[in-house]
Image (cartoon, rainbow, N blue to C red):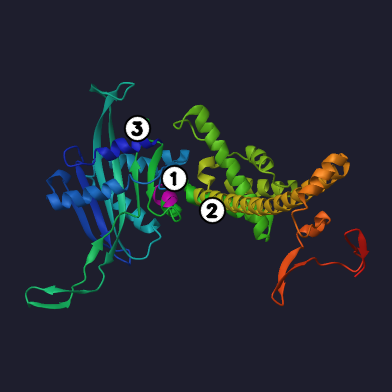
Amino acid sequence: MKKKDILELKRRLKKDECTFTRMCGCYVDGQKNIVLNIKQTFLNLQDEEFFKYLEIARKTLSGTIGNNILEINFPIDEENIGGRQLSLMELKKSKLKNDALLDNFYKLIIDSYDYTGNFLILIFHDAYDVMTKTTDNAKLDESEEVYEYLLCAICPVSLSKPGLGYLEDENRIGARIRDWVVGPPDLGFVFPAFIDRSTDIHSIMYYTKDAKDPHPELMEKALGCSSKQTATEQKETFNTIIRKAIGNDDEKSDHFFMEIQETLNNMVDDHNTVNGKDAEPIILTNDNIQDILIESGIPEEITAKIGKSYTEEFGDTPPVVEHLIDTKALAANEQRKKEERLEKKVRILEERLEKTKIDAALDSEKESASDSRLEADSDSRLESASDSEIESENNTTLNYDIVLQVNPEKVTQIKSQIIDGKKYIVIPMDDDEQANVNGINTLL
C-alpha cells in the first residue's frame, strides 16, 4: 500500500468528481440498539448533507500509512464459504441494495466494536473507472479496470456542550437546547484495498483516528482479518523491551536507548540516500536486530535479553525500522547535544580569555624586567668602557648637585618626599643592605 494510491482515491471525493452511487448506515445508541436506518442515493442528497457526508468519507483516507492507515489481510479460511471476506464481496456486489446483507454487516460491527456511547455506521458504494497512466503520470483516455469498492466510517455521536444561546421565539438569552452531534470517524475501512492502482481482494485498508487504540477486536471479529499494530504501538512496545532489558538505571537506559535510536535513524538515512525516498522500507527482522544492538554498543547480556523479547513480541510480523524511530526523542537529544557543545565553547572561550589576561600580566612583568635588564646592561657597558668614555660620562654628571647610582632593583623603590618643607630623596633599605656615598661605606 502506497501513499499515492490513497491520495488517488481521496482526490476523487469532491463535488464534481465523486461517483458514490449509494450510502447506507445505521445510528446505534449506548445500549447497542439500532435507532435509525439510512438508505440514500448519494448524489441526490442536499448540498449541506452531501458535503458533510463527503467530509466523513475523506477522513477515512487521511493520516499516515502504517500508523493511521493499515493494510490488514484475510487469513485463508476467511476467503472460504462463510468467511468474512466472502460476505464483504457479496455486500459489494449488491451495491448496498440487499437489506439482509446490510443487517448482518451492522450486527457484526455492533457486536464487535468495544465502545461505550452512541455511534453512527456509514457505508458507501463506489465504482471508479481507473484510467491508464503513462510513466510521467499523464492520463490516457482508456480504462485499465473498474475498481468497485466499499468505504465504511464509524463515527461517535455525542451531545453538544451545554451553554447559553439566543432563544429567538422568546427573545431572550437562555439555556441552549443540547442535541446529538456526529463527529469525525474514529474508525473506518476500504474494501477491497487499492494497491498499485488495482483491486486487492485479499486485504483491507483500515483507518484509525487514534493510533494508540486501533480497536484490534474490530479487525478480527467484524472484518475477519489478522490484527496489526500501528507504528505508535510498535514503537511503544520496542521502547518497553529496551528499557526492561536494561533495568532501573534511568541514566543508563536513556543513554542506550538514544544510541539505538541514532543507529536506526542512520540506517534509514543511508537506505534512502542509496535507494531514494520511494524505496521499499527496511524490515527489522529477528536476525538483524542483533546487528543493530551491537553497532549501538549495547553490552552482550542486554543484547541477549532484547533479542529474546523482540522475537516474542513481534514474532513473524517484524516492524518497519522507520516505525521504531522516536523523532521527538531524537530531536530533543540533538538539542541537548547542541546545548552541551555551546556550553563547551563558552568554557573554552572563558579559559582562553583567562589565559590571555595571565599572558598579558606576564608580558607586562617581562617588559618591566626587560627595562631593568637594559639599565643593568648599560651599567655593564659603562664598566667596560674606556677611561675616556668614563671621564666623558663623569663630566656630564658634574652639572647635577646629587648623582645616584643604585642597583636596578632599587630604581622602582626611589621616591621623592617633602619633609619639613624640604625635598628629600627616599631610598628604602633592608637590614642587610649597605650604601656607599662618595666612596664612603655607610651602615645604617
Report the amino acid beneath label 2. Answer: Glu
Q: For this rendering, which residue is in front, 55 or 436?
A: 436
* Label 3 – label 1 distance at C-alpha: 17 Å
Task: Answer left or right for 368 relative to 106.
Answer: right
Labels 2, 3: front one = 2
Q: Is residue 232 above or below residue 274?
A: below
| Residue 4 is covered by the magenta coloring | no
**Residue at figure coordinates x 37%, y 48% from the top left:** 207
Does the CB distance between marks 2 and 1 fall below 8 Å?
no
Residue behind mark 3: 199
Residue behind mark 2: 236
Q: Residues within 10 Å of mark 3 (few under 14, many from 20)?
A: some
Say which mark, if any, is on residue 225.
1
Report the amino acid beneath label 3. Answer: Thr
Labels 2, 1: front one = 2
Q: Residue 166, how many percent across, how many down?
A: 13, 73
Q: For this rendering, which residue is in front, 399 or 374?
A: 399
Where does the magenta region start and end?
219-225
Task: Answer left or right for 243 relative to 324.
Answer: right
* Image quarter of the N terminus: top left
Q: Residue 136, how many percent across, how many down?
A: 32, 22
| Residue 222 is covered by the magenta coloring | yes
Residue 320 can be seen, yes or no = no
Give the mark nearest the N terminus, 2 or 1: 1
Q: In what element is the residue under mark 1?
A: loop
